[in-house]
Amino acid sequence: MFEKVNPSHPDKVADRIAGAIVDLAYTLEDNPKVAVEVLIGHGVCYIIAETSVNFERSAINEIVRRIIGDVFVEYVEVPQDSILAYNQGERVRCGDNGIFKGVPVTETQRELSRIARAIYAKYPYDGKYILDADRLIICQSNVPTEELQAEYPFATINPLGDWTGSIDVDSGATNRKLGSDMADSVTGGGLHGKDLSKADVSVNIYAWLKAQETGNIVEFSCAIGDETIDGKDYSEIVEIAREYIRSVGGFEKFAEWGLV
């Protein structure tokens, strides 16, 4: 049983905006320290950024406009806490406490991800999908139900009828769809809107990759300031995550679908 949401779901819109801001930070510094929270809905986008780099307000507005269109942007920027920043002063060390779990992706999860991507490629509007044993549930906005039913004759499609979606119907917030992003690997730490020094990003990615490679569940815990995890220097964990983010096209692209 698995639920997937597409990149136009309001929560994913928030993740994408946060990811794009992190991408921007990496164009300004090699190793920025940044954490971004986004709340968006009904014509308004609120953003709070704790950051080591200063962003031009026009650049933030352009990111939001490009991803979701013309909405009012309320942006708050503050420096990262100096004590937390000092933790990374001499070398790359674990940026937070956390517990992390990597779980091999099941064929059901892979199949639903394929279905979600195929539908979104044709209908790039807000949608969510569930595969529970043999029951496929498709809720896809801005598409006649009959059209989808012809393509997926055995699916339950838009049970309450046709609908419009995205931020005019619902609000979205960063890291609210971690089950969609991580499947059974979901932990307490959010993936999106943070730089690579944050364990929520790098250790989650590392644990997920190791689970796919070994076929086994892996679990780690860490304390802020730890220098090694799983017998590896934390800087090596960060570089593994950096290469993964590069491979998918950056933090904004990573936010579209997550790890699954």
Image (cartoon, rainbow, N blue to C red):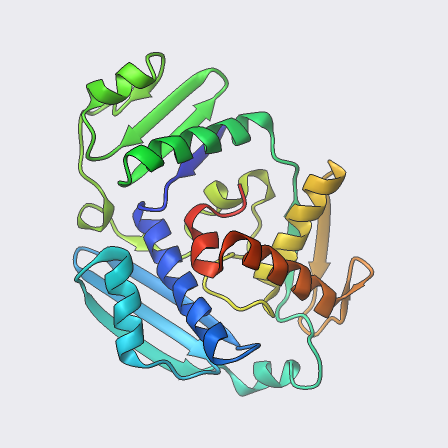
From this viewpoint, which residue is outermost toward the right? 231
Q: Position of residue 257 (x, y in %)?
A: 45, 45
Residue at x 25% of width, y 25% of height:
158
Q: Position of residue 69 (x, y in %)?
A: 20, 58
- Quick check: 68 above or below 93? above
In terms of depth relative to the viewer, which is nearer, 118 or 126?
118
- Quick check: 91 above or below 194? below
In terms of depth relative to the viewer, which is nearer, 45 or 260?
260
Residue at x 65% of width, y 40% of height:
103
Residue at x 73% of width, y 65% of height:
236
Number of marks: 0
Q: Position of residue 254 (x, y in %)?
A: 48, 53
Q: Would you say 234 lies left or right of 56 here?
A: right
Q: Would you say 88 lies left or right of 50 here?
A: right
Q: Position of residue 95 (x, y in %)?
A: 62, 71
Q: Would you say 13 lies left or right of 227 here?
A: left
